[in-house]
Amino acid sequence: MNAPEYVDITLPAGRKRSLTLSNDALLVIGVPVYMGRVPALLGDWLNRIEADNTPAICVVVYGNRAYENALLELKDIVQSRGCIPVAGAAFVGEHSFSSPETPTAQGRPDQNDLA
């Protein structure tokens, strides 16, 4: 088994590199949710993924609202790029825009989320 490879697409420089996967790989892909959607700024990078019947686990993280269609959208994107979605999950987390002045989903996941 090969060691895991981590690709951080948070910053634009990380999205310059394309991702090519074989059918003996496993893609675990996680993206944030904005307004219930996969962020549009990730579209170009996501649509350059090249996979060959690669199993994929899709994960979305949302803060304080809802993930709406983001998980389905991510599944559809990776499937269109040659992946076979085998699992998916949506997780709540403190919103990336949260600050002391404007706390948004601060401390999440909290005990209610975990229950």
Image: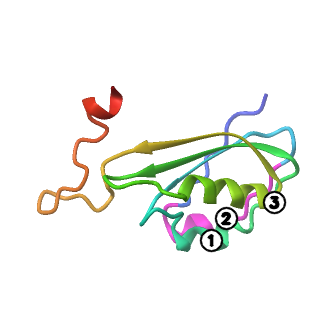
What secondary structure is marked by label 3?
Answer: loop
Q: State yes or no: discs 3 and 2 in contact (Cβ < 8 Å).
A: no
- Mark 3 crowd level (few <14, some 14–19, many ≥20, 10 Å Cα): some
Q: Is residue 73 magenta?
A: no
| Residue placed under numbered mark 3 in the picture | 50
- Residue 100 position in % (x across, y down): 13, 57
| Residue placed under numbered mark 2 in the picture | 46
What secondary structure is marked by label 2?
Answer: helix
Specify which label sits upstream in the sequence, 3 or 1. 1
Residue sitting nearer the eye, 2 or 115: 115
| Residue placed under numbered mark 1 in the picture | 43
| 106 relative to 10, above or below | above
Q: State yes or no: discs 2 and 1 in contact (Cβ < 8 Å).
A: yes
Corner quadrant of residue 34:
bottom left
Q: What residue type is labelled 3?
A: Glu
Chief secondary structure of the magenta span? loop
User: Which range is magenta?
Assistant: 10-21
